[in-house]
Amino acid sequence: MTTNPDGQGKRAVIIVLDSVGIGELPDAAAYGDTGSDTLGHIAASIEGFDLPNLRALGLGNIEGVAQLEAVERPAAGFGRMTEVSHGKDTATGHWEFVGIILDEPFMTFPEGFGPDILDPFIEQTGVGGVLGNKASSGTVILDELGEEHMRSGYPIVYTSADPVFQIAAHEDVVPLETLYRWCELAYDIVIPKGQSRVIARPFVGTPGNFKRTANRKDFTFPPPRETVLDRISKAGVRVTGVGKIGNIYAQQGIDDDIHTDDNDDGVAQTLACIGDRTGLIFTNLVDFDALFGHRRDPQGYGRALERFDAQLPSILDALEPGDLLLITADHGNDPTYRGTDHTREYVPILAYVKGMPAGVALGTRATFADVGATVAAYFGVDWEIGESFLELIAHRED
């Protein structure tokens, strides 16, 4: 391993706009996602929709982004990336960013879990039975089954479009340590079945006023081999995860893990990190996906994008000359599409180095792993997976 002696004084920021896809991938039909276009369909749904600050970086200049006006001189490198891994979920996309490309997708259970999972779970935990056992929004399922859970004591088991097994229980009914123990037992059952995470979802309150608490705990299957996060951390670069980043990677390669309440908090925490540390700051803004994509709410999704766009200048202003900012997404979740699942789409890549001249076209990248390769090159760390585009954005002529 070789390192740049100046690498530890540098700063790179990755912001993942969770689920902001920009049009169907060539293999979308195999996933049932023909015609999906998260950003394009949001723009078409909202009169006057505009993201001027993202456009200034080059969002409207990316191939396939026809609904947003291009600018003559984009400030960032702009392009789109192809997902090589099989799948369209959070873990798959984020793992590919850092060099883990999956030949087989994680398993999802949109119709609920079978007896091969639930029977041993009930037997080993001694819970007697479960409620739910379906794909659902966490808040919706609490409204639906929270009161019955309090009466029966049965845990609420549910899943989502991601490969996750989630257990919700009221803190006055099930002690936290008991809930966490149930999750540990579930982990040993579901991970061999192709799931990536078990999540404890404790909540409090009364019927009609249930609220999930900060005592959530994730039990995550770790990346199966070294990632670029491991490599740069070992080289002395501080890696900070903001939002659900630490959970996605099971803390592997993460030096500091900062949880957030929502997108606004994610932006605030990112700004705080830019102000007090160097190294890699890796942020996921999940509200686009969780609150609007799965709920098929294009209006809410659009407003959330406009809000982030309004916050973007504060991020750009906080950066220092030479800092690297990458803005991308991990999959699509077209809020105008049928169903409630993610969609198999290209994702944008905007690559900005403060102090550098106008942007350059990055084209269609062959893999999300180009993100990790670029970060490794920026910090002067050897990395073999993906193709860095750092030279394109850091050594261009005005």
Image (cartoon, rainbow, N blue to C red):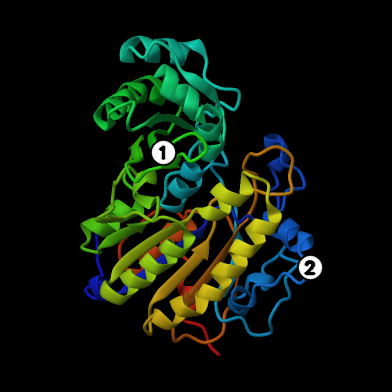
Pick whichever, 366 or 265, lies toward us.
265
Q: What is the crowding at mark 1: few (fewer than 14 residues within 10 Å), some, or many (at least 20)?
A: some
Does residue 391 appear to the left or right of 5 in the view shown? right
Task: Identify the residue under disc 2.
Answer: 47
- CA neighbours of label 2 inside 10 A, class few (<14), some (14 to 19), many (20+): few
Q: Earlier in the sequence, mark 1 or mark 2?
A: 2
Count of residue discs: 2
Can residue 91 be seen in the rendering of this structure? yes
Quadrant for the C terminus in the image? bottom right
| Residue topped by disc 1 | 205
Q: Residue at x 54, y 47 (%)?
A: 290
Across and down, in percent, residue 24 comes to 70, 50
**Left or right: 27 as drawn, with respect to 398:** right
Label of residue 326 in the image: none
User: Which residue lies at the image location 73% right of the left edge and 75% below the top edge?
Assistant: 69
* Amino acid identity at mark 1: Gly
- Percent x, y of residue 247: 36, 45
- Kind of element beneath mark 2: loop
Q: Amino acid at mark 2?
A: Glu
Residue 216: give x, y in percent of width and height.
35, 40
Residue 87 place in picture, x, y as percent:
56, 38
* Residue 104 in sight here: no
* Location of residue 52 by image quarter: bottom right
Q: The N terminus lies in which quarter of the figure? A: bottom left
Q: Which residue appears at 27% of the width and 29% of the height? A: 175
Instruction: Tell me: residue 307, above or below residue 214.
Output: below
Looking at the image, do the residues carrying marks 1 and 2 touch, with CB atoms under 8 Å apart? Answer: no
